[in-house]
Image: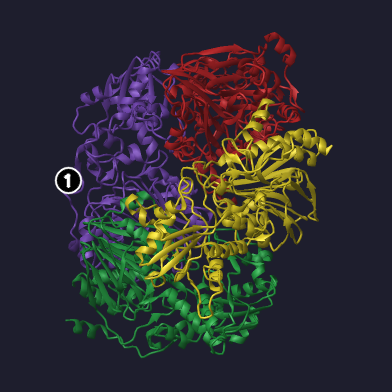
Chain colours: A red, B purple, C yellow, D green
């Protein structure tokens, strides 16, 4: 598994790529804090620096200077329980017959074990357990007797699952997005070159212009002189399976993904939430920072219509939007956890209610999602302790009922509060006065796509991929390897 | 100088104080990131752990376990240019004839050199350059022939300047605030003891109740069994000199300082700002996170009245409040700075404009203050690059024209953009379409105090203390040492 | 290149192998200080911990506990100029079709590039530049369609050069020595298992008994229950090519290599040195610690015979053996190098002459070898500065005239003082009163082997392997791969 | 307590002193590995860098560059059980009325508590528990109304115990040795200045010439321009109390202390040992490295006379000297200790017997001292396990029966094997065939001094100082403070 990660690839006209790659990774830091790495190419030589920790800790000035060459790729890796293991840090780099190969991968293959076994059967030896090494070996093998584009196509036909890849083959930088476009990847134009990145915020950081998303099934090859890029549509499926959760939770609000600005999507999901399950209260309060955009849209809508959908009378200001939970801005860094009996207070280390905003008020608390339910319960209890008269909870996404197999490490099914509880049971458990989630229809509606073009496995339990033991939500239209190759010939 | 720092002191009924002190410091982390330290007392033994870095990095579980005793004090220190020096980290601890002494200091003495010289003249040797060691030596000397309360009084009469101190004398914990109350300090009640802290947020974090602020010139002595505290009003002046800038910038929004909730103060300063210099525009946008509360109050007021002060017509919604600058949440951590020619882009690493909110719009950008002007200039230019039609800048405090001598390390006079420029000249330099600051009167008004009870030296150039080469804004009413002592006899 | 390194492999009856491996590596620390690593096997799982630095720094208690399983291998790596690169640290571990493979390698292949190219040609991808990965891939490939012993034989037939390997294949531990036995490897019996190690000192450290050396061309497979080992003589050549320099310089004096105790070999080389080129002087003084055993043998012989070979008269005690250069026992650890103009004094940081032993005396200084000549020159000058009347230098090995290609990183040809200088020219350069080296015949004589059974490439310039651009000292009798395989069928 | 430590002080003509101080400390590293520090003076400014760990780890190039000034002092501190505490690291530096003071101390005061209490009584506050801070405060106080020389005299009259001090008072460097000369301190001349150091090896390392030892009770003041030094004999007692154990164990063999070369002293102690208790055996073997010089003298004497003292017959070579225990040269660095049941083998990690030298032989094992007896027992057992026929143990010093109060942290009385056991009982416990120690008379004889001029408290239980609960071995002739001052006027 390569989890929620961030990938980037850059090709420039002569200028060293290491610093732009570094700042690009810095902009994608929210997608992975476990490790960071950069691989660059400099004529015939590959330079690699991969280190555990945050981008800022992983590289020194000297490291960046040693990463010669005007082309390269980068990666930030998301921490996953128990796997703090430097051997899985990326980019993964190998050298083989016809040159060097570097890979950065965001996503998760569903047939990695099968492909690995097949490659092992013809003699491949693996130094890690990762999907990425499997892709690298398959691609290296295909490059033995095929040109670059056909080799990539063969590998795409062989591997199933979600993947956004940036690849360096000597000093050629490429980007590939899986045929269903599950993980995001976009193209940007810089002053003197081009960039591929998981999110457009990385392009903005480098003062570049977003060109467009990489299309599902597309291979983008950056020109080595930074002058442009070529596109190869290698696989073409009827449906896509964009991850809706990127929009709800994972991506930066200032990123544009698949043509939608994440911030606006979140505000619109908040507006829908009011429309579907608005409740009158004294205050609309976001859980910072995750609920802020949702709450702002919800409060906006609430100032225009009543819960019933009628226009508000002119002398009714509707609910007030207010920040009532203040965040310790050092949260997220190392600190010693409270002991068991201090544990229930732990939430106070992160969030502190503002009494004047809370005391005696009926409050609507807005968040993006509920995973285990523990935090929601603590927040409701925190507000009640600070004198809240009522606490209504509204969530900007449907209940999460099943795990993600596509690369977002949310939780196991047992840990998900909604996996085996009704909304009413959850409301009881988190002790809210009322609780409502957004509908799946509303999500599809806001994202302005067909429900069948989204991956909503985690909220429906039906997946757009064949996963052993799970249901699929569509007839898989994947062409076989043979079919694909002949199509290409 | 001991700069803007955070102090805490705790006395409990038997339970070890080290963990509550740790979480208290964690809540005050915004007041100082250079070093963190705790001193505890355990019967006859003093335990000390002081380390460079953030609270979370400065202590291990084992460190906390070694800090025995149910009474102690803590300190977080603010980084100041060029002084990354472990010898100044606090608490400062010494042992002397009648026991052990630990001191945590927030503030800045104006006569430290003089007191130091006097003590050196009678044989004292100093291991650091800090004010805190001077106070410790003076107090230790006074304790040779006076009881605790009288010794503290003598020291208070001897030292001039701003100070909020937590002191441990063996296992007695005390708090002192200078006679003009420049730096904040408050008292809180915990389940099984009492706490003194720079800000009430530290009390909240420990699920305690704010009792009240320590009064200017007051000594508070916590009972060793955690059952209460005694108060000694040791010096009583007519005027106070509360630092208004704590409210504007430095304190956490969820803290209550001198009876005012900081968040509400900032919202009200924002409302005043609209009243004094409101301008109609499409969007009101905060600089995150510093301008958020100001912008929210400003937008609220703008939805009620027109810039002229008239009620808004019912069909006029006024200006829209929107977050248009998205913050990289990893900003503030280590990273390699861009090279000189990338420098102007550096602001993009921290803040990214949301195009849909900015493009073609007239924007009012709200911040709490302008120090050097560099960031404001970059933000205006960033918004213009993203297509803003107009950028109006509104600042929730008066222009900073002079340095702070009382413990907030803002900048030297040369660096302050307002020190020798008119508002119009500043507007030109930051390239805004219009610029307005709040008046000093508005600040006093919102803080509901007399102008003469505030220290506004940094915005008036006149200080409530005698500072060589600077003007004072009041006849100093300080009793001389002799007078004070006889008054006490 | 895998340079002078140390390897170990252990198979025990149930007890975890990690601690014995750790102590074994500790005993071999002199063979490599750059990195240390252990790979263990535990049923189906391979555990690996490889880290830069000394053994004591590379592992924590927790690391050893995590290295489960009663079978494993270890490696210490020698630092080589410019290659401080964690990607070459060993053991190298891979998983492939039929299981897991771990390799520790001491030696240097002469056809690594060729084998690598061949493997790349059939699709292998490499993550490092090392020989070891090449061996691992070749062995993994052979294991696809051959049993363990035949797979190892095929690999031995394919790779040319020097190698002592410990290999883990799942929980089977093996040791292999190249057909010419260039690098040492021996077998030891422990209380509850067996051990393979570069030197017998590692066996002693674990209170084991040396069984015998692994024979050139032999594969030794340890029983998984620690009960014994099997031997397979896979390649059988007429001549061996044992490295004589292991005895002179590299191995621990307390190790037994190819049936000779290193300490005794060195003493006997010292005796020969007296016989060949003894010179009467007041004091025989070793360069500590490298020259001590040589000097002790030299002085012993000198007390029995005169330089001419005659028995000493009974009233003539011969020369006195004395330690006259005292070593700073912290030498070898980190310290800041003297500046250029302090450089000539640098030797004083390491060695300090004892004046009473040196002043006015004629001294014979004994060392094991001269590489660049810089140290010898400094030592002679140091003794002269301390008042030595004469300084005669005697070296316990022949002049080093050519580089080592077999895994000992001595120096490039340009750096070797003897590469283009006569003994007289060297004497002049190091400013000694006289200088003599031992003959190659004496070395062969002391090691009690045929000259043709030793690798003396570095002192003859003729190698027992085909090295591009260098002469060989023998008709290579290596069977071709085809021949070998049919022989085996 | 400041234990066995190393001190140095240097004054140069313009050249920065930091690097020479650094190399001086490096040469004294054996005297202390816990911490290292340097204080320099540069006109009016004092620079200090003190860090835990070895000299090589404690300083970077940048640290040395920041230590400006051509005068300074340095210190290495010995680790003592339980006190790994950075607050005691030295040099200790303070600033006070008339300037800055830095102190490096080797030794131990017997009245530190008393002086501390007295100073505390007049207002002094202490930041550590160390003797050194007490001396610094006393000296600073005396400097308030006395010139440098008289102030030092007053302090010497006030403090009792052992001390060798290097002191910086602004850019004046001084050295002081206690009136009984317990700890060593010597003066050296450098090319462009003068040096004070605990041992002459530090002078050699800097290519300097040993001038002489600092005399007991003498103050040496280095000229600030490096041109010479002044001497002030401030206290003059009849007897000295030089520590004999410096010669036996602690000092480097290449140092000259109180006019004796330590290496020669050890060899002569070895010769005496043969004379007093020689035993015929096949091999004389040193415990490396501590027993080497003793064993060499013992074997020398044994080749001349029989145990009875008669000349050896000409055909009798006497006993053979041989190194039979080989040391792992990485011993002393970090490594994970064996578990309890591996513990008895632990000695093998450090020392490995050479079988050919040991097997079937009767061996005389020579060491400098026996403290707890554990190591001796392990060594005897190690030799027996390797086949030794007999093991006779000979020790180059008398039995240690009492603790050291003068600064050498040997062990508590309970831990000393000789504290309550006869020699025969010790022999039984370490399982040797015979055991003999050297007599106290022999020690005094070899050191060519009166027994009354040595401190032999640890082997007699009678001390040259008044120590509570211990006997003294002489009438103390210390002049009172009053007497001393009038004598000086």
- Which one is nearer the viewer's eye here, B76 or A222? A222
- On screen, residue D32 versus residue B372, left or right, reads right
Q: Position of residue D167 (x, y in %)?
A: 29, 67
- Which one is nearer the viewer's eye here, B15 or C46? C46
Residue at left offset 70%, top offset 32%: A421
Q: Which residue is mark 1?
A: B474
Mark 1 burial class by Cα count in 10 Å: few <14, some 14-19, many 20+ = few
Q: Position of residue A208 (x, y in %)?
A: 43, 19
Q: Residue furthest right?
A: C489
- Which one is nearer the viewer's eye here, A428 or D463? D463
Q: Is residue B411 above or below residue D448?
A: above
Q: Identify the image quadrant of residue D170.
A: bottom left
Q: Position of residue A18 (x, y in %)?
A: 46, 29
Residue at left offset 74%, top offset 14%: A482
Q: Is residue C20 above or below residue D5?
A: above
- Which subunit holds the residue at mark 1? B
Q: How many marks?
A: 1
Residue C265 in view of the camera: yes
Q: Identify the image quadrant of residue B232.
A: bottom left
In which quadrant is the N terminus of chain D drawn?
bottom left
Q: Position of residue A77 (x, y in %)?
A: 57, 33
Q: Identify the image quadrant of residue C439.
A: bottom right
């Amino acid at each position: 598994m390569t989890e929620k990660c961030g990938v980037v690839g850059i090709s420039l006209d002569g200028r060293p790529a290491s610093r732009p790659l570094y700042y690009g990774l810095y902009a994608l830091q929210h997608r992975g804090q476990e490790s960071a790495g950069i691989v660059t190419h400099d004529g015939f030589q590959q330079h690699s620096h991969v280190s555990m920790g945050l981008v800022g800790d992983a590289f020194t000035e000297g490291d960046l200077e040693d990463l010669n060459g005007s082309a390269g790729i980068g990666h930030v890796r998301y921490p996953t329980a128990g796997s703090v293991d430097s051997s899985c840090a990326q980019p993964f780099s190998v050298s083989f017959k016809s040159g060097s190969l570097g890979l950065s991968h965001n996503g998760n293959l569903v047939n990695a074990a099968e492909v690995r076994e097949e490659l092992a059967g013809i003699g491949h030896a693996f130094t890690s357990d990762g999907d990425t090494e499997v892709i690298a070996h398959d691609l290296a093998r295909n490059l033995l007797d095929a040109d670059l584009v056909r080799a990539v196509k063969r590998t795409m036909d062989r591997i199933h699952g979600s993947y956004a890849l940036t690849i360096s083959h000597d000093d050629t930088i490429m980007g590939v997005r899986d045929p269903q476009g599950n993980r995001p990847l976009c193209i940007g134009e810089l002053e003197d070159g081009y960039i591929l990145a998981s999110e457009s915020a990385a392009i903005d950081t480098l003062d570049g212009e977003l060109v467009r998303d990489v299309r599902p099934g597309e291979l983008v090859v950056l020109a080595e002189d930074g002058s442009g890029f070529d596109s190869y549509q290698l696989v073409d499926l009827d449906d896509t399976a964009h991850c809706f959760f990127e929009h709800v939770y994972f991506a930066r609000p200032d990123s544009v993904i698949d043509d939608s600005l994440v911030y606006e999507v979140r505000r619109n999901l908040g507006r829908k939430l009011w429309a579907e399950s608005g409740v009158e209260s004294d205050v609309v309060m976001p859980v910072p920072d995750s609920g802020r955009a949702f709450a702002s849209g919800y409060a906006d809508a609430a100032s225009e219509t009543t819960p019933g959908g009628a226009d508000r009378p002119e002398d009714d200001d509707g609910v007030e939007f207010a920040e009532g939970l203040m965040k310790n801005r050092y949260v997220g860094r190392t600190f010693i956890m409270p002991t068991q009996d201090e544990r229930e207070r732990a939430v106070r280390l992160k969030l502190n209610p503002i009494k004047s905003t809370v005391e005696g008020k009926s409050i609507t608390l807005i968040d993006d999602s509920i995973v285990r339910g523990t935090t929601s319960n603590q927040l409701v209890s925190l507000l009640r302790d600070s004198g809240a008269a009522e606490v209504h909870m509204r969530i900007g996404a449907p209940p999460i009922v099943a795990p993600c197999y596509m690369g977002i490490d949310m939780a196991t099914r047992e840990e998900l509060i909604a996996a085996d509880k009704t909304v009413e049971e959850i409301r009881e458990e988190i002790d809210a006065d009322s609780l409502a989630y957004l509908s799946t229809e509303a999500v599809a509606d806001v994202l302005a796509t067909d429900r069948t073009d989204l991956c909503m496995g985690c909220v429906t339990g039906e997946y757009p991929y064949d996963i052993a033991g799970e249901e699929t939500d569509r007839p898989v239209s994947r062409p076989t390897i043979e079919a694909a190759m002949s199509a290409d010939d």
